[in-house]
Image: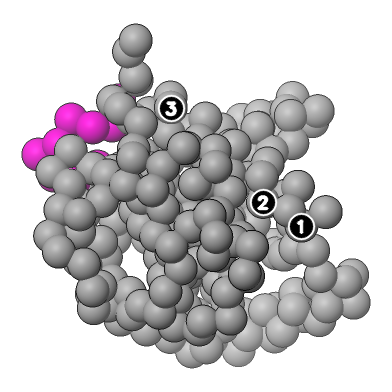
Amino acid sequence: MQSDRNSRLANIVVDLIRSNMARMPKRVLVVGCGSGREAAELARALDADVTGIDIQTRFDPAAARVAKLQYGDATALDFPDRKFDLVYSYHALEHIPDYRRALREIRRVLADDGCYFIGTPNRHRLIGYVGSQSSLLNKLRWNATDWAARLRGRFRNEFGAHAGFSRNELQSELSGAIGPAKNVTLTYYVSLYSRKATYVRLLDRLKLSSLVFPAIYFIGAKYGSRAVGHRHG
């Protein structure tokens, strides 16, 4: 079941890349790859050379046969400048205390025509962990912890909360550190919940998406690059 979910998410990301990047990436870095399963799914879906890094190294053996998985510090990436066509980071940035340094490192290792795809929890969400494969009891506990932090005025990453960023915060951070960031959150959720796409779009039209969508996603390019735009051909 988890493998199917990773595959579906990877295919959604690939569709977003195909729609927004001038060319498909062949060299990909996944920052905060966890078990490595998602990196492996991206390697398959993109038919690309994918490297995944994480500060923990409990990598899935099967994933390690598909993607190159290794220890790595997001704030000090052990790669040369302009190494990758795409840097992908999914729900990792909020766990990095010096995330601005990590963003600068992402920019450094991106090719001049490279792109990034970054997603984090939505700090303004009312309910989180909707797509988690964990138990309902864990989801209730985690949401209760989040709301307790909100009530204390400590629902911020720097206070140890799994808060993430608001849409404007993340867009500003990405645009300032790497290059122009395009919000693809709505497209992501329309694809994820395709059978309920009408309701997803309605929430957005009613300006409720910032409260309902549990996460936010952006795709962008380095300053000076024309890599992001509608792909032709």
Q: Are marks 1 and 2 in contact (CB under 8 Å)?
A: yes
Tell me if I can see residue 154 in this picture: yes
Residue 10: x and y, percent? Answer: 58, 44
Give the label on residue 6, or none: 2
Query: In this view, which residue lies farthest toward the top?
Result: 233
Disc 2 secondary structure class: helix
| Three-letter code, disc 3 | Arg
Q: Position of residue 101 (x, y in %)?
A: 23, 74
Compared with 98, 107 (above or below) is above
* Type of the residue with mark 2: Asn
SS for tag 3?
A: helix
User: Is the stretch drawn in magenta largely helix, strand or loop?
Assistant: loop
Span colored in magenta: 221-229
Residue identified by numbered label 3: 18
The Cα–Cα distance between marks 3 and 1, rounded to whole angstroms, is: 24 Å
Check residue 233 for magenta coloring. no
Residue 203 seen in the figure: no
- Residue tagged 1: 2
Q: Residue at x 35, y 31 (%)?
A: 24
**Corner quadrant of residue 191:** top right
Examine the structure image and report whether residue 224 is included in the region drawn in magenta: yes
Question: Label 3 to label 2, Cα distance in Å?
Answer: 18 Å
